[in-house]
Image (cartoon, rainbow, N blue to C red):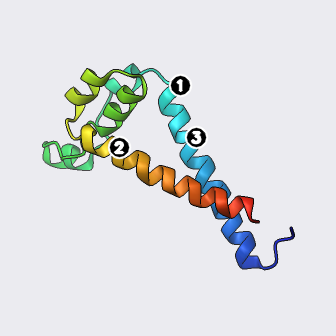
Amino acid sequence: MEIRSSKDRRKLLFALIGSLAILSLGLVLVILPVEVWEGGRSVCLSKTIFGHQCPGCGITRAISSVLHLRFGDAFAHNPMIVVVFPLLCLIIGRYLMRNIKIIYHA
């Protein structure tokens, strides 16, 4: 099937790039050991400027820990992982399914 308009091509391009970006980020979190995220300076703007952790502090480390099946560590990094990780999976899953439909029907 031929792509008819530039709008369709743009939609397909964004679907491909977005899906590849999400999958690449997930792959990085799975491949790199959890210890990579442990050290170094905080990337949290709130913690850097004000010296206090925000509700999202530790969520990247927690997600990495969950992906490595280290659930206790994940909860220690940020207890909200219990809510955030399932919601994130749902949002990413819906996004990827929508993009798969766009790519498949292109």
Question: Residue 33 in the image: x percent, y percent?
Answer: 45, 20
Q: Name the residue carrying label 1.
A: 31
Q: Name the residue carrying label 2.
A: 86
Please rate how many residues cluster around mark 2, counting C-alpha atoms within 10 Å: few if below 14, some from 14 to 19, many from 20. few
Q: In the rendered view of the protein, which quadrant contains the N terminus?
A: bottom right
Q: Which mark is residue 24?
A: 3
Q: Is residue 8 left or right of residue 78?
A: right
Question: Residue 43 in the image: x percent, y percent?
Answer: 32, 41
- CB under 8 Å between discs 2 and 1: no
Vertical side of 91 occupied by 89: above or below: above
Q: CA distance from mark 2 to mark 1?
A: 20 Å
- CB under 8 Å between discs 1 and 3: no
* Among the two numbered marks 1 and 3 on one chain, the one whose residue lies closer to the N terminus: 3
Q: CA distance from mark 3 to mark 2?
A: 19 Å
Q: Amino acid at mark 1?
A: Ile
Q: Is residue 66 left or right of residue 80?
A: right
Residue sitting nearer the eye, 68 or 44: 68
Q: Quadrant of residue 52?
A: top left
The residue that appears at 36% across and 29% down in the rendered structure is 66
Does dot 3 land on a helix, a strand or a loop?
A: helix
Q: Disc 2 or disc 1, which is closer to the eye?
A: 2
